[in-house]
Image (cartoon, grey):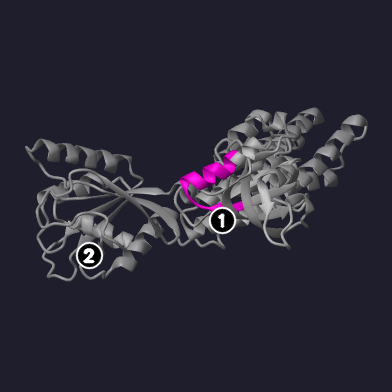
């Protein structure tokens, strides 16, 4: 990304996906944003103004023009620094959606002095200009990619600064302790009083515990961002495809009384109590000489092996089949929910002792809520709501938190054991640096590039 080396460039990009639609929005940001807007916008009527003449946060009506030719009828919104997303002058053009019109508008803007923005460059400028810290900037990407309400709520909480506030509070406390320790290094003849040392150790212990607590949310954050892969397995005609359709709320997989209809894996994502779950419908597991079905069985077993959760579907209207009994044994050490389908029919199926199952009827929907509860319980180990997940850290943040916690605990041990204060001061500097890395106060250019490169164009 070239933006840190050229922060005075005026950048532009479509902020909406390319494709047919009612509207497309193009964003221009930088020192010449108003001038670029003037070059492409022709006001219509007596009340509309060119961007350079318009007040901040106003909408102007007119046309985008290039070489004297009208390209589209548009609305232009003017945002003057610093009350903008990037804290730079910003112009947004709302034009008609579509591959051709949006492209022509963007080309006109680029021909008038703006350059195409890099992925995430608008948000990177918001960070570099002090509007967002690094955890908030990462929350923007999480909010855009959120696949459930719970994921969106967690991202919104982080965007509002909940995680940043906790990190800054810990950092401030660690810096105060570090200042106290380094002051004693300047006066080596003055020992730290026992009462003072006790207070410093207590503050370090509290800080380390807070860092550890935030680090533990990494697993929940991974689940909310990436989702959980759940393989639906079982014998042919047990109701695997019907269960997938029931969980999705629409007919995604083909359902047929003919055994072996599903020959390949079918994947679809659904929100289960706020958890994005990627359900994988698989071919029925049975011995077969048919080459295509045999490949489907192989893929089914591979999907089950790679999944984090397995739904083993059994047909409750028939006695337990030996192949189901074998599969029950194979899955004993896996996170598995056994689903007995066809609860609306007589149930001759008897499960082995100690084997629990959730009963459902894919025909009537009976038992669906109980299955959702079981999935939630297995994923979270207990009910989790947006209120219970005010922050969730990602892998980068978890690594920095781990390093900060380790440095804090080593500093406390150095103080407690009576080692030279230089050891404690060194560990505290490591801890403070790692905490500062979380919010971007000590982040390197390479780290910033790696983070913002993951963003979409226009954000």
Left-right relation of 450 to 18: right
Residue 99 in the magenta stretch? The answer is yes
The magenta region covers 93-107
Q: How many marks?
A: 2
Task: In the rendered structure, find residue 154 and report the number of the disc placed on it.
Answer: 1
User: What residue is pinned by disc 2?
Assistant: 362
Left-right relation of 406 to 259: right
**In the image shown, does 216 or 302 lie closer to the viewer?**
302
**Dot placed on the residue nearer the N-terminal end, 1 or 2:** 1
Residue 85 shows in the view = yes
Q: Give the x, y percent position of residue 38.
A: 72, 46
Q: Give the x, y percent position of residue 332.
A: 27, 47
Residue 121 shows in the view = no
Residue 129, picture quadrant = top right
Q: Tag 2: Cα neighbours inside 10 Å, few (<14), some, or many (≥20)? A: many
Secondary structure under badge 2?
loop
Name the main secondary structure of what is drawn in magenta: helix
Q: Tag 1: Cα neighbours inside 10 Å, few (<14), some, or many (≥20)? A: many
Secondary structure under badge 1?
helix
């Amino acid at each position: 990304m070239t933006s840190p080396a050229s922060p005075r460039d005026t950048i532009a990009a479509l902020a909406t996906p390319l494709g047919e639609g009612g509207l497309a929005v193009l964003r221009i940001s930088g020192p010449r944003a108003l001038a670029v807007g003037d070059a492409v916008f022709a006001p219509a009527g007596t009340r509309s103004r060119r961007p350079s003449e318009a007040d901040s946060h106003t909408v102007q009506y007119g046309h985008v023009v290039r070489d004297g030719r009208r390209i589209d009828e548009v609305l232009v919104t003017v945002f003057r620094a610093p009350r903008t997303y990037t804290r730079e002058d910003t112009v947004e053009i709302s034009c008609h959606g579509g591959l051709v019109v949006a492209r022509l508008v963007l080309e006109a803007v680029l021909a008038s002095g703006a350059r195409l923005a890099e992925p995430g460059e608008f948000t990177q400028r918001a960070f570099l200009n002090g509007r967002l810290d690094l955890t908030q900037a990462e929350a923007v990407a999480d909010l855009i990619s959120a696949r459930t309400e719970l994921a969106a709520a967690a991202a919104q909480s982080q965007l509002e600064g909940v995680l940043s506030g906790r990190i800054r509070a810990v950092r401030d406390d660690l810096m105060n302790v570090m200042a106290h320790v380094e002051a004693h290094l300047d006066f080596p003849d003055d020992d730290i009083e026992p009462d003072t040392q006790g207070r410093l150790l207590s503050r370090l212990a509290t800080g380390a515990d807070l860092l550890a607590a935030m680090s533990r949310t990494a697993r929940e954050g991974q689940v909310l961002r990436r989702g959980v892969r759940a393989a639906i397995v079982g014998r042919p005609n047990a109701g695997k495809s019907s269960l997938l359709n029931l969980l999705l709320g629409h007919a995604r997989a083909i359902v047929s009384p003919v055994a072996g209809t599903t020959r390949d894996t079918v994947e679809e994502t659904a929100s289960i109590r706020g958890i994005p779950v990627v359900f994988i419908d698989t071919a029925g597991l049975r011995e077969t000489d048919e080459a295509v079905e045999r490949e489907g069985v192989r893929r089914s077993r591979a999907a089950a092996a790679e999944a984090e959760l397995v739904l083993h579907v059994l047909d409750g209207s028939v006695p337990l089949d030996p192949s189901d009994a074998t599969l029950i044994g194979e899955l004993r050490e896996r996170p598995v929910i056994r689903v007995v389908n066809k609860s609306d029919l007589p149930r001759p199926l008897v499960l082995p002792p100690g084997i629990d199952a959730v009963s459902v009827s894919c025909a009537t929907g009976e038992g669906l809520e109980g299955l959702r509860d079981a999935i939630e319980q297995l994923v979270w180990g207990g009910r989790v709501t947006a209120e219970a997940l005010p922050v969730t850290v990602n892998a980068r943040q978890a690594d920095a938190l781990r390093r900060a916690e380790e440095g804090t605990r080593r500093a406390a041990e150095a103080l407690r054991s009576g080692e030279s204060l230089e050891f404690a001061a060194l560990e505290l500097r490591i801890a403070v640096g790692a905490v500062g890395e979380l919010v971007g106060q000590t982040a390197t250019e390479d780290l910033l590039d790696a983070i913002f490169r993951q963003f979409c164009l226009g954000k």
